[in-house]
């Protein structure tokens, strides 16, 4: 506008304790009605940069937890975070900034546009390390584990009573039910196989009589089911174990001493002096070197909190003064050695909560977020950690466990003729939508019953995500989860609604009470408000129609714990709306999809599981009719409904199929 001038303000960088913050402010020298600023540019980041959202009014209007499989295009994004170098660049929020991925190669660039009467850009270097005070976070030194972490852990179901006989039965059931084909990769043996009661190489590497075949047999059996072996070890050296007691007598300098010269054992265990190279080489290094040699693909290291708390005991203060170090650094030494010996291709889980875990970030691939027992709410409370610092682990997901769920409720799902337990659907599905670790842990007989498996099948594998929010929205937001999925042929959203059970008065029991229908505005989700979308609910296989502006999420009664809506932009021609393989509704199975306008053919490729009915639901715009449907090497059954057509097959094997649908107008 004529006469409008812009001033640039650049206050000096501010911050305390290295929390540097730089700001650029653009403003009109004279405010005029109807006149605003538009800032356009390009942001260049590393290959680990992604768009994200800072806390603002959008979250107040519609609280949810957001993440993305691939790069987000959501309109709630107002920032770019570069994990590689740990910096955050944020612009005005509340849909006044638009960030779109522009080009990829060795790095990623983003088209940036901000519109407002006054514009301010905020740059925060070392965002997680300094501004969020995660002091050990140095992402340029490591990459987050990208593959699925999905499988079975023995602990919650069996505690110390898991045996070789149980392993035989478990692997046979997993193989028979084709759970590895669905994405269950690991079987992790917990505190059940070792001899003795203390952490020393002899105890971990000598198997007890519950496993007469030892490590060699266990690994061979697990691999025969098409899975990888996982193993548990601890950091606690209990002197009531004869082997540990002997080591303490022979090598007292390997352990922390009290000021009077006696070995520290206030918590019931000796504490290793990790600054003593002989101690590390004698007590730690041989364990992980041999586990690597044996062929374990997953190692769970327990007791980070036990060891850290012991180091922080006042009787250890003299020890740390002498060695000029800290309890946190001594804890980190342990995991540093484990990583050196296990290498980069073995998944390491740090176990004992976020606090101790922050001290070994970059050395462990995953962190158990809390204490024993499945705690799904922790996935929302720490959603900004996922695939930035590590993989979030909510602990063993017992699919028949009752915590925060209603153990009486049964919901209808498309894969079962009769309603199934809400627990078996919602519990694994929460891990999947959060992008976290999914390690089930029930008695073997639970998996023999097909009624218990639909939720497990549709939740695995877990797709790796990055946070859609650079803050933790917390438990108050976890009713709604939004996951974007970016593929070369399409970008769509999956919105999940969880009905958390309510605690009975004076009882630790939980009941579903039902929730009313709710209008969901596409703009509140960060989608274009003026576009048409087609919406499909996964568990009921119901098409909710073509919608503009909003759609209505149906009411949920006391026997419905979850809804999962695929939201795709409507096209003028037929296009896949949903698939039955996985609750991402295409994120796992769809490898390709394309439309040929000249021949009216929709074709693509899908990964399917042998024997598992696979259904493609295709949106059918007005005027189109299905003529033929073909699937390579398989029988295809087609059916038409109002606004959709379905093509169903039962694959003869786990493989990639090619499919083709021809339409007339």
Image (cartoon, helix red, strand yellow):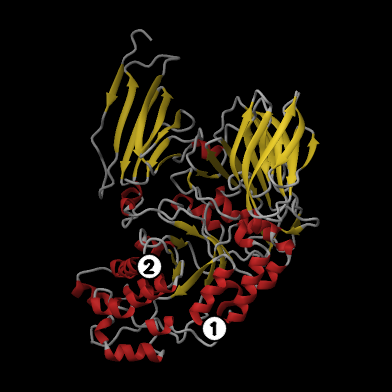
Q: Most extreme residue toward the front, as rendered?
A: 633
Residue assigned mark 2: 342
Q: Give the position of the N terminus as an image quadrant.
A: top left
Q: Secondary structure at mark 2?
A: helix
Q: Position of residue 448 (x, y in %)?
A: 71, 68
Q: Position of residue 10 (x, y in %)?
A: 26, 30
Q: Position of residue 387 (x, y in %)?
A: 44, 51
Apparent side of residue 218 relative to residue 114 in the rendered image (left or right): right
Q: Secondary structure at mark 1?
A: loop
Tag on residue 494? none
Q: Give the position of the C terminus as an image quadrant.
A: top right
Q: CA distance from mark 1 to mark 2?
A: 24 Å
Above or below residue 15? Residue 263 is: below
Residues 295 and 407: in front is 295
Tell me where residue 320 sits by quadrant: bottom left
Residues 126 and 655: in front is 655
Q: What residue is drawn where x is 73% and y is 66%? A: 449
Residues 570 and 185: in front is 185
Whether pointer 1 and pointer 2 mark residues with C-beta atoms closer than 8 Å, the reply is no
Q: Position of residue 367 (x, y in %)?
A: 45, 62
Q: Most extreme residue toward the top, as rendered?
A: 2
Q: Which is nearer the N-term, disc 1 or disc 2?
A: 1
Apparent side of residue 238 relative to residue 571 in the rendered image (left or right): left
Above or below residue 289? Residue 8 is: above
Residue assigned mark 1: 211
Apparent side of residue 8 relative to residue 460 in the rendered image (left or right): left
How many C-alpha atoms fall within 10 Å of the one at disc 1: few (<14), some, or many (≥20)? some
How many C-alpha atoms fall within 10 Å of the one at disc 2: few (<14), some, or many (≥20)? many
Apparent side of residue 417 relative to residue 90 in the rendered image (left or right): right
Q: What residue is drawn where x is 47% and y is 73%? A: 232
Q: Can residue 194 be spotted in the picture?
A: yes
Q: Can residue 401 be spotted in the picture?
A: no
């Amino acid at each position: 506008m004529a006469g409008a001038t812009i001033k640039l303000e650049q206050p000096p960088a501010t911050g305390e304790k290295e929390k540097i913050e730089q700001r650029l402010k653009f403003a009109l020298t004279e405010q005029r009605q109807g006149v605003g600023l538009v800032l356009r540019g390009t942001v260049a980041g590393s290959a680990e940069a992604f768009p994200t959202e800072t806390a603002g009014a959008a979250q107040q209007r519609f609280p949810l937890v957001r993440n993305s499989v691939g790069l987000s295009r959501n309109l709630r994004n107002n920032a770019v975070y570069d994990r590689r170098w740990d910096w955050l660049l944020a612009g005005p929020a509340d849909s006044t900034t638009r960030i779109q991925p522009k080009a990829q190669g060795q790095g990623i660039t983003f088209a940036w546009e901000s519109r407002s009467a006054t514009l301010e850009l905020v740059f925060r270097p070392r965002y997680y390390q300094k501004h969020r005070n995660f002091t050990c976070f140095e992402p340029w030194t490591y990459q987050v584990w990208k593959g699925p972490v999905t499988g079975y852990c023995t602990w919650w179901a069996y505690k110390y009573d898991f045996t070789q006989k149980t392993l035989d039965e478990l692997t046979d059931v997993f193989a028979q039910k084709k759970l590895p084909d669905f994405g269950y990769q690991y079987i992790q043996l917990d505190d059940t196989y070792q001899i003795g009661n203390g952490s020393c190489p002899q105890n971990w590497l000598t198997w007890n009589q519950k496993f007469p075949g030892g490590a060699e047999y266990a690994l061979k059996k697990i691999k025969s089911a098409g899975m990888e072996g996982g193993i548990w070890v601890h950091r606690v050296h209990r002197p009531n174990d004869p082997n540990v007691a002997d080591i303490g007598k022979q090598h007292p300098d390997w352990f922390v001493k009290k000021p009077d010269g006696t070995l520290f054992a206030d918590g019931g265990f000796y504490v290793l002096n990790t600054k003593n190279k002989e101690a590390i080489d004698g007590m730690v290094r041989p364990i992980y070197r041999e586990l690597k040699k044996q062929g374990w693909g997953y190692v769970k290291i327990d007791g980070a909190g036990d060891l850290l708390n012991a180091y922080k005991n006042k009787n250890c203060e003299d020890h740390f003064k002498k060695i000029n170090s800290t309890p946190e650094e001594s804890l980190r030494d342990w995991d540093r050695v484990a990583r050196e010996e296990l290498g980069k291709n073995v998944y390491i889980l740090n176990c004992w909560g976020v606090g101790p875990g922050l001290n070994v970030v970059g050395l462990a691939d995953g962190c158990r977020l809390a204490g024993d027992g499945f705690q799904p709410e922790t996935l929302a409370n720490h959603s900004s950690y996922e695939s930035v610092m590590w993989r979030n682990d909510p602990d063993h997901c017992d699919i028949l466990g009752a915590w925060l769920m209603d153990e009486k409720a049964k919901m209808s799902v498309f894969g079962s003729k009769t309603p199934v337990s809400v627990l078996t659907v919602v519990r694994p599905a929460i891990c999947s939508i959060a992008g976290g670790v999914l390690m089930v842990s029930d008695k073997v007989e639970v998996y023999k019953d097909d009624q218990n498996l639909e939720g497990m099948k549709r939740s695995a594998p877990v797709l790796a995500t990055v946070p859609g929010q650079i803050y933790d929205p917390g438990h108050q937001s976890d009713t709604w989860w939004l996951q974007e999925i970016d593929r070369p042929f399409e970008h769509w959203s999956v919105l999940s609604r969880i009905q958390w059970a309510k605690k009975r008065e004076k009882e630790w029991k939980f009941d579903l009470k039902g929730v009313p229908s709710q209008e969901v505005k596409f703009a509140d989700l960060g989608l274009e408000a003026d576009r048409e979308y087609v919406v499909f609910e996964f568990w009921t296989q119901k098409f909710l129609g073509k919608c503009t502006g909003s759609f209505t999420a149906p009411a949920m009664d006391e026997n419905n714990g979850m809804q999962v809506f695929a939201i795709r932009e409507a096209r003028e021609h037929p296009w896949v709306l949903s698939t039955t393989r996985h609750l991402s509704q295409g994120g796992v199975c769809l490898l390709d999809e394309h439309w040929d306008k000249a021949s009216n053919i929709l074709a693509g490729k899908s990964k399917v599981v042998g024997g598992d009915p696979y259904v493609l639901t295709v949106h059918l715009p007005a005027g189109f009719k299905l003529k033929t449907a073909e699937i390579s090497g398989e029988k295809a059954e087609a059916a038409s409904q109002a606004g959709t057509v379905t093509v169903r097959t039962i694959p003869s094997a786990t493989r990639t199929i090619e499919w083709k649908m021809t339409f007339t107008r």
